[in-house]
Image (tube, helix red, strand yellow):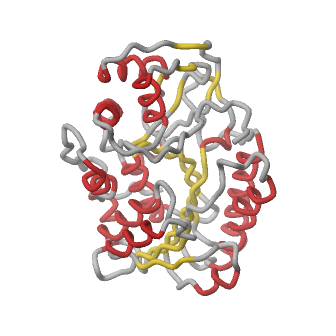
Amino acid sequence: MNEVGNRKATVSLPDRVVGVEQLDELLSEPPAYLVHALAELDGDVLILGAAGKMGPTLARMAKRSLGTDRKVIAASRFSNPLEQKKLNEWGVETHKGDLLDEQFLESLPDAANVIYMAGMKFGATGAESMTWAMNTLLPTLICQRYSRSRIAAFSTGNVYGLSPATGGGSVESDPLMAVGDYAMSCVGRERMFEHFSATRGTPVSILRLNYACELRYGVIVDLARKVFSGEPIDVTMGSFNAIWQGDANAMALASLAVAQSPALALNLAGPEQLGVRSVCKRLAELLDRDVTYIGKEASDAILSNGQLGHRLFGYPRVPVDVLIEWIADWVKSGGESLAKPTHFETRDGKY
């Protein structure tokens, strides 16, 4: 397996982030290794399920990497028309429709490189059949439609289940011990990509993300807003992983260059195992708040070991201490929130 591009590329980081425009700029800034990796590949990039929390800046990063010679295409339901408008303004070609509609799927353009981001997590409890349709049936349709493409398919660290808090996190070769319909259906998603990769020779990378964080959304944002508002912090899920969303964007796109048959599984996670208690202590200092805790740290948590990804692409450009400082300043300054809690503390698999 080859390393991709320049692993030691650095980026100049601001002391603070002011406004959504600057935030989107940072989240979509491509590192040198990504520009190199995409230059080595032929064809356009198609992003399926591009209107979520992560898709728009990932699409913009792809466009900034490729320039004007190759297309970046985004397909989604685009329930918020402003998301589609923003992507168009960034030079991304958009197609609006339901990916489960096979006629819409067939109408999409061919592309040599596909990023699969569609899925269902929140609301899975009580809508189990739709969860399985989105997370397992849809990947089957995508694999049939784009069997001659390279595919980078988003998954989740939840497929591992809980792992010992002292064990360094789950690695890609660990058995999958998913709990609950959401996580089990994501195992189903992975199995479909693995099946078609093996039977049709489709190069695939499976991206077990745990967890992407920016300033409007993410585990650290959840904790910061609770500390700022004086809510007690439950430390039962006592540890977690976090990675700057811009770094996760870059690693996901660059994984197209290492996609293979049989499919390659890859954890996207920060290098640190973060303690909820210690992160909240730092946030309380930055936010000038007191913090109280409830519960007791369990002996296990949802944890991923990201070392394979770091060997391939290098360490994240935004260190976690900088991310914590940015988030605290953003929250304290009244910065925008996506108002979508991560529910990272969930231990029973019910989302």
Q: Nearer the viewer, residue 316 or 285?
A: 285
Residue 281, above or below 31:
above
- Residue at 43% across / 50% down in the picture? 248
Q: Is residue 300 left or right of residue 228?
A: right
Is residue 151 among what the camera can see? no
Where residue 236 sits, quadrant-wise, is top right
The quadrant the C terminus occupies is top right
- Residue at 69% across / 52% down in the picture? 186
- Residue at 39% across / 72% down in the picture? 85
Q: Position of residue 101 (x, y in %)?
A: 69, 77
Residue 211, above or below 77:
above
Q: Is residue 179 left or right of residue 328?
A: right
Q: Position of residue 95 (x, y in %)?
A: 51, 79
Residue 169, above or below 258:
above
Is residue 70 among what the camera can see? yes
- Residue at 32% across / 30% down in the picture? 321
Q: Nearer the viewer, residue 261 or 108?
A: 108
Where residue 166 sits, quadrant-wise, is top right
Q: Position of residue 125 (x, y in %)?
A: 76, 45
Q: Position of residue 237 (x, y in %)?
A: 60, 24
Residue 321, above or below 77:
above
Count of numbered badges drawn on the protein: 0
